[in-house]
Amino acid sequence: MNRARQVAEARLGRALRLYFINGLLIWVPVLVTVLVVRFILDLMDQTLLVLPRTLRPDALLGLHVPGFGALLGLLIVFLTGLLVTNFIGRALVAIGEDLLERIPFVRALYSGVKSFSETVFSKSGSSFKKVLLVEYPRVGLWSMGFQTTDHLEEISERLGEPQVCVFIPTTPNPTSGFIIFVPRAKCIELDMSIDNAMKMIVTLGVVGPGSHSATGTHAAHPAVTLASPGPRD
């Protein structure tokens, strides 16, 4: 009798743990996503401060509606892009950049950020459009990185062969990392997309791009993998 009671209690404990874990697998991604989206919307709502108080949505509607700041930010970016496509807009930008170039610290910061933005967002560039495997930090170990540039004339000349600059991000924070120069012949270019590579880095490799099947298509993966009960006693 006692043996049967112990078995029943053990099964009940495993079932309760199973239900709790499955609940966490559902709610943790949802809550984290909601918190991140809310943080971004709250941050974008700060752009409403450029409007007079009487013209802000809070004053006009009498309640706070999140997301208006994001719409205003997108509108400002669009209008700015529209402005700088004509002669007058480019002239105004040139005047503003000339003023920034006269400020010592701001000059270095602005020039670096501008160069990075032009390189990353340029359609003609190859930066952050290729996922590479490089043998690093030693022979036999491989790291995944992103090609930033292959226009390295002086470095390639001094090293005796064409070089590629590769950004190796850290995990789980891909905004930090370091760059290395690798011979082009020793870089392995992957078919993996930038998004899948970022997912793999952020999740410590838990969320991979999926393996290719024999037909060349990605194997199907469930959106959420729930825990399953173990073998019964």
Image (spheres, grey):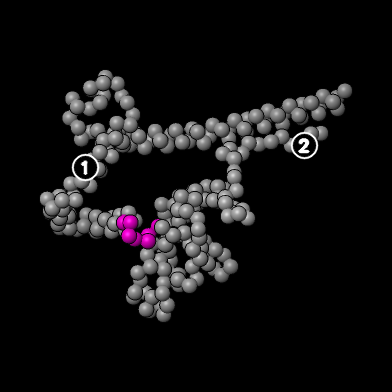
135 to the left or right of 111: right
Q: Cβ–Cβ below 8 Å for labels 1 and 2?
A: no
**Which of 4/120 is in front?**
120
Q: Which residue is mark 2?
A: 231
Residue lying farthest to the top in this orientation: 62
Residue lying farthest to the right in this orientation: 1
69 to the left or right of 159: left
Local SS, label 2: loop
Local SS, label 1: helix
- Quadrant in which the N terminus appears: top right
Give me the residue at 50% from left, 33% from top: 30
Q: Main secondary structure of the magenta part?
A: loop
Give the CA distance from mark 1 to mark 2.
62 Å
| Mark 1 residue type | Leu
**Which of 9/126 is in front?**
126
| Mark 2 residue type | Pro
168 to the left or right of 95: right
**Residues drawn in magenta:** 122-128
**Which of 201/170 is in front?**
201
Residue 210 falls within the magenta-colored stretch: no
